[in-house]
Image (cartoon, coloured by chain):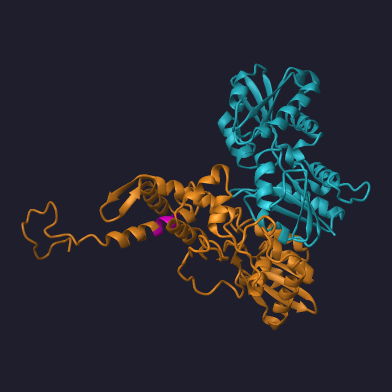
Amino acid sequence: MSDAPEVRGAHAAGGIPAARQALAEWIDAAGGEGRTFLQVRLLRTGDGRYEIRHARDLHRSILSLETVTSDPYAARFIAQMTSGGEHRPLKTAPNLRQGWALVDLDARALWTALDYLYPACALHWHAELAGTLRVTHWREVAARQSGMYGAVKLLPPDVVRNTVRACCGDAVCLRRVAWDVDTDTPLDLPSEGDVTGQALVPCPEACSMFISFARQVLVLERAPRHELPGLGRLGVEEIEQVREIATAAAAGTLGAAREGEFSEATNSRRMRYLALRLAEEKARIGDLPAPELPCEGCPKAVPCRGCPMV
Amino acid sequence: MQALIIIGHGSHLNAESSAPVYAHAAAIRATGAFDEVRECFWKEEPSMREVFDLVEADDVYVVPLFISEGYFTEEVIPRELGLDGPAPSVTRKLGKTIHYTKPVGTHSSMAGMILRRAEETAGLTDDEARDAGLIIIGHGTERNSNSSEVIYRVSREADEAGIFGHVRTGFLDQAPEVGEVLEAMEERRIVLVPFFVAEGWHTQETIPDDLGLNRPAVSPMTEKDGRTIFYAAPVGTFPEIAQIVLQRAREAGARLPGGVAVGEAAGV
């Protein structure tokens, strides 16, 4: 699809009413069980009335929930922070907090509330079903970046693929990537299996988190690398990252880095990228040969029975 | 139907950056002046790329909650929204007429707001203020020379008001750097006001840390080298900014009932 200015950002011009109706009908058709949309449960509670809860709060008594409101705009406060008080720049990160219910919503308020929990997601879900989703591929997104992000266009396709795997997997974002490197260069991502919930929400183009992460990846990829026996070719920053991850894991502070703090060695996407790099290197160099006995420093010239190392 | 879209920078790291956008949007929504009011951001969701899919109205007014006519308002926003040009511009696409306005920061009432911030933070008497210095901090950028224009203009207007003895301008990403400006000032009391739209990484962390000041969460005042330095909150969090957003939309042709005013509940 084109990224020409006149259609940029358009998935279904004037299509909100149709998508809103489709959403309501989809929920109505499910009966009392409702539908799971990413991490929330959409329930029909009466004729044209709806309720939204966190899917894991489905069977909780409404009296036990901290926030119960019929104001659809309250969704924005629910979506703003994790249960641990962390900022959520990406609303499709799988860390929506629990403990709330948006109740007594009509179809319009349901749409508004869902759009504040998951901006544009219901529209993209509907566009995908209707075949009207407009996808912007990576090269077009990268080419229009400027300033500090202008260099992301230098990432080669295989690095873009690993960046997507690290930055966009279900463990960090529940959308499914619908774009490719370009029309002729598919991303060929490994399957992630079933989507979370009952709705596939496509990602029509790389978001700002991805672009920012891609810039960090470019820095890592351009660093000179050293061949380390058993680990492969790693840059100085990657080696230091291995050390910092071990230190943080030992101290129990893994997971403290913020979601968008890509300069941090223990940032989740940084660690996911390192894991992919290490796996790739391992595939390239294979395992180290098993050590030959006798062990270094052992006074015995031949392996012996009762060796404490075996 | 007419819609208002307020665009903010947003942040990958903290919620304070988008907070004024949401607060001003909520205040304007409560006036009922627009059929729809929506927020969008550069660094958060909803993104600028999808915002026209979030409003149904065919008449759309886009107001940037930014300070300068610079890199973001003249290059990034028109590019990301697919507009025909920088503000003021009118673009017809997707069956909509999109009116793109100038940012709030270039509005004529900004110097007054900065002076109010300075006075509120430092609590100086008139005489004390006349002996004190005021530094207006702008972000600045080497990427777009227009970016600093409004900062200098507002500094000049604040200086002409004659409340503070000296008014100077300092930047983060261009010369003169704010640390050097602070060093060079001789006053015993100095008030720093960030000409920023929101609290965030710069206002809460990089500026106080680089200048060796208490972070605002600790104290707005720092005693340092025999001087008292007051560090104010950014101007963009003033509730009155919502009124400026409305005025920007009106200037671009939005049909607003006479006397529509944003309530005091707009506090950020």
Residue B194 position, x and y percent, is 68, 34
Q: Which residues are magenta?
A: A271-276
Q: Is residue A251 left or right of residue B256?
A: left
Outermost residue toward the left? Answer: A301
Residue A121 in view (yes/no): yes
* Rendered colour, chain B: cyan
Does B194 appear above or below B2? above
Q: On the rendered image, what quadrant is the C terminus of chain A found in?
A: bottom left
Q: Quadrant of residue A89?
A: bottom right
**Viewer-closest of B219 and B21:** B21
**Viewer-closest of A210 and B211:** A210
Q: Quadrant of residue B125?
A: top right
* Rendered colour, chain A: orange
Q: Is residue B140 left or right of residue A108?
A: left
Q: Is residue A216 left or right of residue B218?
A: left
Residue B144 position, x and y percent, is 64, 35
